[in-house]
Amino acid sequence: WATFVDDIAAILELKEKRNAVILAHNYQTPEIFHCVADITGDSLALARKAQTVQADVMVMAGVEFMAETSKLLNPSKMVLLPSQEAGCSLAESITADDVRLMRQRYPGVPVVTYVNTSAAVKAESDICCTSGNARQVIESLGVEEVIMIPDEFLAQNVARETGVKVITWKGHCEVHERFIPQEIREWRKAFPDIVVLAHPECPPEVVAEADFAGSTAGMSDFVASGKAARVLLVTECSMSDNLAVEHPEVEFVRPCNLCPHMKRITLPAIRQTLEAMSGQVEVDAAIADRARQSIERMLAVKV
Ligand code: 13P
Ligand code: SF4
């Protein structure tokens, strides 16, 4: 705790000095999420809130695609990402060329792209979605078939919810693909009153075992609603740690899968970024406008 306290004090001072705010995703560790962050949430909330940030600098305690999205939505601000290794297995799974080839193969079919992608991939897309609005985005298109990339499982889960046919890509989240139905059945056997909440990046057979599936904000809201005394969160570990701080009355039972990318962001890394003003995120001007349009179309869809 001594080093935590020292880093936290330094970060709070640096935020003032640099006129900076810290945005933290729900998978950040509690000392970041609860002690230094100004804005927290799922990918959708972070994108919405980034649009209205007034401070000069945004530090993204999250992964690269979240930092790029903040830059696209509030381009006059400086966006800093404290680690160059905070990527995402989904974003890595697909390139802009891949999207162009998909379009050639399925002419006229709209491309719905998960925000967990590079700006270059977003620029080739018709509209983005997050796990918090995927159903509404798909339904807003009013079509029978979409190309939904790159998360195969999210696409399959949404197809089941909406009845819209999806052409998928073989991208997976390296954290959520590891969960298996058997694991959930065993937890249910051990704790028959357990309420199971799963992220829709999990395989469909895992989501089928859950009582509720939703984005990290959806899971948070479910816990806050007080409907469950004992909860199994089928998602990244820090989510339970953060919620446990806010809801001491709830018991969190959890299989623990860590996101190595999210975990690249630490208090020392944030401190260093703010000290050196390093890790500046830029989006290539040739793609920025088209990428922004895909995100803005998504934000215009009512949830
Ligand atoms: P959310 O948008 O639900 O926060 O998910 C982001 C993410 O990376 C999940 O793995
Ligand atoms: Fe990407 Fe999965 Fe990590 Fe989220 S948890 S950032 S989807 S690798």
Image (tube, rainbow, N blue to C red):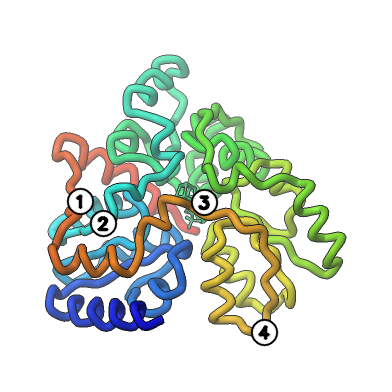
CA gap between label 1 and label 2 equals 7 Å
Q: Which residue is mark 2?
A: 81
> In the visual, does 109 lie left or right of 191?
left
Instruction: Tell me what residue is drawn at x 29 percent, y 54 percent.
Output: 83
Of marks 4 and 2, which one's residue comes earlier in the chain?
2
User: Quadrant of the image for the N terminus?
Assistant: bottom left
Q: Position of residue 252 (x, y in %)?
A: 67, 71
Q: Which residue is mark 4?
A: 249
Total number of numbered discs in the rendering = 4
- Per the model, the C-alpha gap separating discs 4 and 2 is 34 Å
From mark 4 to mark 3, how far is it between C-alphas? 27 Å
Which-is-in-front pick, marks 4 and 3?
4
Residue positioned 41% across, 50% down in the render:
261
x and y, in percent, of residue 280 in the image: 17, 54
Dot 4 or dot 3, earlier in sequence: 3
The residue most toward the top is 105
Indicate whether 231 appears above or below 229.
above
Mark 3 vs mark 2, CA separation in Å: 22 Å
Tell me if the residue at label 4 has its CB under 8 Å from ligand 1.
Answer: no
Residue placed at 87% from the left, 60% from the top? 189
Q: Nearer the viewer, mark 3 or mark 1?
A: 1
Q: Secondary structure at mark 2?
A: loop
Q: Amino acid at mark 3?
A: Ser
**CA neighbours of label 1 inside 10 A, class few (<14), some (14 to 19), many (20+):** some
Towards the viewer: 273 or 78 = 273
- In the picture, the disc for residue 131 is 3
Query: Which is nearer the eye, 182 or 139?
Result: 182
Q: Disc 1 residue type?
A: Val
- Tag 1–tag 2 contact (CB < 8 Å): yes
Classify mark 4: residues with Cα within 10 Å, few (<14), some (14-19) or many (20+). few
Residue 273 in the figure: left or right of residue 180: left
